[in-house]
Image (tube, rainbow, N blue to C red):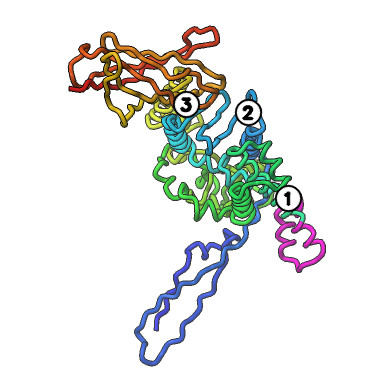
């Protein structure tokens, strides 16, 4: 009987990639009556833990710059005060979204749409220019994995020390280091979950509720859920999220082309690879520039070998380029054996200037143009945005009626939403038919960031218009404290004249 064993082809390359595990082929016993049977045996190799080595270099500095920047924004924004409130607060209960000087309502959904369009085209632009820049430098999975790895290195040591510690039997020192590390991890995760909820509940009130034990069930759930997700993803799953859970890794190739900057190994210059003395002449030995030190594999957060070409697991962090430059400096070779380059540049031997000139191709210019147009439209709309909104609703209980004096009356309800953070007085008037008048029940004052329904009665002389439906316009003017008009809105409606 023939036996076929199906397993990852990369298992055969375990010497080049020590993170892979070889699984022995398990023979299947044959039977007397099934000599010609063919069986498929699927062997599963358990994922081995990756221990990324620390690295220094220009891309590592940029990565840590983005870690600091993103976390200053994330952790800092909820604590910034704007007047008498939190600067950024998404109050779902009141259906108001406070973003510095703007107060947005659900009716302002168009702005959220514009932000999503900007985010999407920004991702397209970054990917077309330099591959997975988002993944390598600003993705929360990358950011928190870097933070958790930093804690792990401080407590347990660098790569070799961590491997050795995990291989030892349980001891007091090992237990102390593991517990110490997880305490820090849990503290970071809990603070992250608390900050996340602080965007939806005033964070100072949330802090008092937390210490007094008065948090609502939903607040408790989301704090611990987000903390658990951070703790699990950044502490344990790490590269598994990038390789198997993130959909971006699967469709990123659709946004790449041969002029996209990606982390690339210079095969022509590096091969054939092999160890050698620092003083040896590689050309005399028939060797390329690669000394086969495997450091590029050891620093990779996803455990791949960049020398095998572009792989979907690569997040474009540039760690392999940094460590390779360090090795090239030590052996006295030119830098750039692993670098950001394009497929066309590597094939044609372009200079850096030629490569960058081809990077800014029509596709990239189109993305930039769309981004500029959408951002300009969003800023213009925000700048021209009225500080209030009005909805006109006819009173369906009484469409039209004849009142004292022989006048025809229609009743309307106006919902005025004050988007400013100061109380506003409004002046209401109506136009569209001759001798039409408007009567207001009470005043037209709306408190800051509040909405109010105001009933108005519009009257028309009996013989002023023919029977039927007639278009009219309500003019709503916002007044300042001195009674001067600040801004105006005109809302359309209809006036019904009975037969």
On the image, the x and y values in percent for residue 71 come to 64, 37
Query: Front-most of 317 and 144?
Result: 144
Left or right of 471 on screen, residue 204? right
Circle on res. 452: 3
For the C terminus, which image quadrant? top left
Q: Look at 30% across and 22% down and name the residue there.
A: 410
Q: Do the residues under discs 3 and 2 have CB atoms within 8 angstroms?
A: no
For discs 2 and 1, the disc positioned in front in the rendered view: 2
The magenta span reads 154-179
Q: Look at 53% across and 43% down and name the residue there.
A: 135
**Res. 349 visible in picture:** no
On the image, the x and y values in percent for residue 431 come to 31, 12
Circle on res. 85: 2
Q: Around disc 2, counting alpha carbons within 10 Å, would you say few (fewer than 14), some (14 to 19), or many (20 or more)?
A: few
Q: Is residue 168 above or below residue 333?
A: below
Left or right of 210 on screen, residue 474? left
Q: Is disc 1 placed on a helix, strand or loop?
A: helix
Q: Do the residues under discs 2 and 1 have CB atoms within 8 angstroms?
A: no
Distance from Cα at disc 2 to Cα at disc 1: 31 Å
Q: Which residue bears the numbered disc 1?
A: 184
Query: Front-most of 220 and 490?
Result: 490
Earlier along the polypeptide chain: callout 2 or callout 1? 2
Q: Is residue 188 above or below residue 351?
A: below
On the image, the x and y values in percent for residue 319 come to 61, 44
Q: Is disc 3 placed on a helix, strand or loop?
A: strand
């Amino acid at each position: 009987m023939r036996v076929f064993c199906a397993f990852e082809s990369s298992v055969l390359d375990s010497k080049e990639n020590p993170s892979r595990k070889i699984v022995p082929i398990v023979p299947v016993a044959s039977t007397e009556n099934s000599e010609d049977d063919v069986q498929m045996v699927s062997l599963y190799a358990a994922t081995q833990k990756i221990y990324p080595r620390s690295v220094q270099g220009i891309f590592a500095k940029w990565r840590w710059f983005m870690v600091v920047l993103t976390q200053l924004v994330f952790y800092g924004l909820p604590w910034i005060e704007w007047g008498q409130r939190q600067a950024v607060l998404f109050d779902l209960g009141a259906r108001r979204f406070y973003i510095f000087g703007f107060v947005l309502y659900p009716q302002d959904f168009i702005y959220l749409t514009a932000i999503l369009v900007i985010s999407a085209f920004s991702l397209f632009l970054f990917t077309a220019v330099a591959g997975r820049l988002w993944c390598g430098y600003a993705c929360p999975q990358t950011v928190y994995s870097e933070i958790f790895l930093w804690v792990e290195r401080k407590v347990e040591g660098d790569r070799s020390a961590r491997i050795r510690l995990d291989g030892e039997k349980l001891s007091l020192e090992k237990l102390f280091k593991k517990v110490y590390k997880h305490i820090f991890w849990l503290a970071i995760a809990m603070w992250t979950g608390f900050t996340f909820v602080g965007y939806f509940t005033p964070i100072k009130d949330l802090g008092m509720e937390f210490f007094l034990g008065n948090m609502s069930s939903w607040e408790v759930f989301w704090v611990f859920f987000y903390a658990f997700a951070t703790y699990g993803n950044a502490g344990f799953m790490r590269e598994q999220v990038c390789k198997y859970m993130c959909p971006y890794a699967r469709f990123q190739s659709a946004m790449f082309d041969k002029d996209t900057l990606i982390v690339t190994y210079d095969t022509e210059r590096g091969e054939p690879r092999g160890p050698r003395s620092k003083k040896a002449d590689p050309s005399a030995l028939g060797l390329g520039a690669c000394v086969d030190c495997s450091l590029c594999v050891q620093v990779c957060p996803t455990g791949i070998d960049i020398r095998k070409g572009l792989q979907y697991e690569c997040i474009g962090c540039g760690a392999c380029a940094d460590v390779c430059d360090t090795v090239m400096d030590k052996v006295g070779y030119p830098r750039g054996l692993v670098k950001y380059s394009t497929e066309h540049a590597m094939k044609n031997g372009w200079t850096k200037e030629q490569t960058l000139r081809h990077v800014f191709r029509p596709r990239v210019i189109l993305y930039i143009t769309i981004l500029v147009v959408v951002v300009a439209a969003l800023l213009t709309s925000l700048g021209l945005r009225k500080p209030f909104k009005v909805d006109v609703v006819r009173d369906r209980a009484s469409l039209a009626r004849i009142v004292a004096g022989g006048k025809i009356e229609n009743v309307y309800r106006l919902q005025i939403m004050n988007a400013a953070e100061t109380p506003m007085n409004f002046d209401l008037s109506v136009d569209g038919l001759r001798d039409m008048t408007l009567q207001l029940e009470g005043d037209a004052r709306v408190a800051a960031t509040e909405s109010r329904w105001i009933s108005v009665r519009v009257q028309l002389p009996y013989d002023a218009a023919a029977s039927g439906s007639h278009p009219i316009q309500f003019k709503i003017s916002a007044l300042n404290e001195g009674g001067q008009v600040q801004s105006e809105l005109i809302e359309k409606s209809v006036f019904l004249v009975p037969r």
